Image: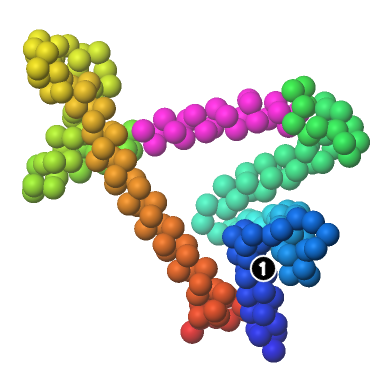
Amino acid sequence: MRQRITQIILTTVALLLVASAFATRPQGPGDTGASRLLAFCDQHFSLWFSVLAVFAFTLGGVNLMKTHWRKVRERAADWRYSMVTLASFVAVLIVGFAKFGGPPGLQGDVAAPDSWLTGIFESVLSPLHATLYALLAFYISSASFRAFRARSVESTILLVSALVVLLGRIPFGATLTAWLPAPLTFLRMEDLSLWILKVPNTAGQRAIMLGIALGVVAMAMRLILGVEKGQGGRSGK
């Protein structure tokens, strides 16, 4: 029974959202009940979703604390990292709720320029992000070195395209083909690089985004129709 109620709520809300987004609703004293309902859903559902998101974040924070506290208590593998995670989570949570260094009260900006939370973000989180991205660049370079090997026609095309784009983005690459005459300017490195980025790259990105959109639509239809077995409290077995 609980699963049916969950599915009914999910299907009803989803259909109302779809209808409120795509249906044409006339404005005026002659509005029907259906048009008023769609207008109400369009105006208030986003606010309700924000409230639900707050509870979802709360549950996520509680689950994070329970998971890492269990690792610390049981001295599981890498439990020291869990201790650092718990300490950081609690410290930032306290600083954010207390609004240290910022304007007090419910209307005070928690991200004020002089607040402790802004200082933590700019002095701790931003450098950590920069460090992680720098490490990621080395990992990408290592993976690219292994991937860019002319073992087949496809890998050869990938290797040549990558080299053209890389050389076309730097001044040295432009000087390599600067000697080409005016009728052959389309073969210059910077022009070839721009063409690869605008034509094949854009076409590939659009194909990928279209595939993702179709996948999202298919998953939404499965959820609306109750075909997806992993939702509504069911185990999927």
Q: What residue span does the magenta drawing correspond to? A: 116-137
Q: Residue at x 71, y 28 (%)?
A: 118
Q: Residue at x 85, y 33 (%)?
A: 108
Amino acid tagged 1: Leu
- Secondary structure at badge 1 equals helix
Please state, as top left, top right, bottom left or bottom right, where the N terminus lies in the image: bottom right
Q: Nearer the viewer, residue 167 or 145?
A: 167
Tell me if residue 199 can be seen. yes
- Where residue 101 sits: x, y (%)? 82, 26
Look at mark 1 in the image and give the residue it sits on.
16
In the rendered picture of this protein, how many numbered marks are placed on residues? 1
Q: Is residue 127 above or below residue 92?
A: above
Specify whether 79 is left or right of 186: right
Q: Nearer the viewer, residue 72 or 26?
A: 26
Q: Quadrant of residue 63?
A: bottom right
98 in the magenta segment: no
128 in the magenta segment: yes
Tell me if residue 44 can be seen. no
- Where residue 37 sits: x, y (%)? 76, 66
Magenta stretch, main secondary structure, is helix
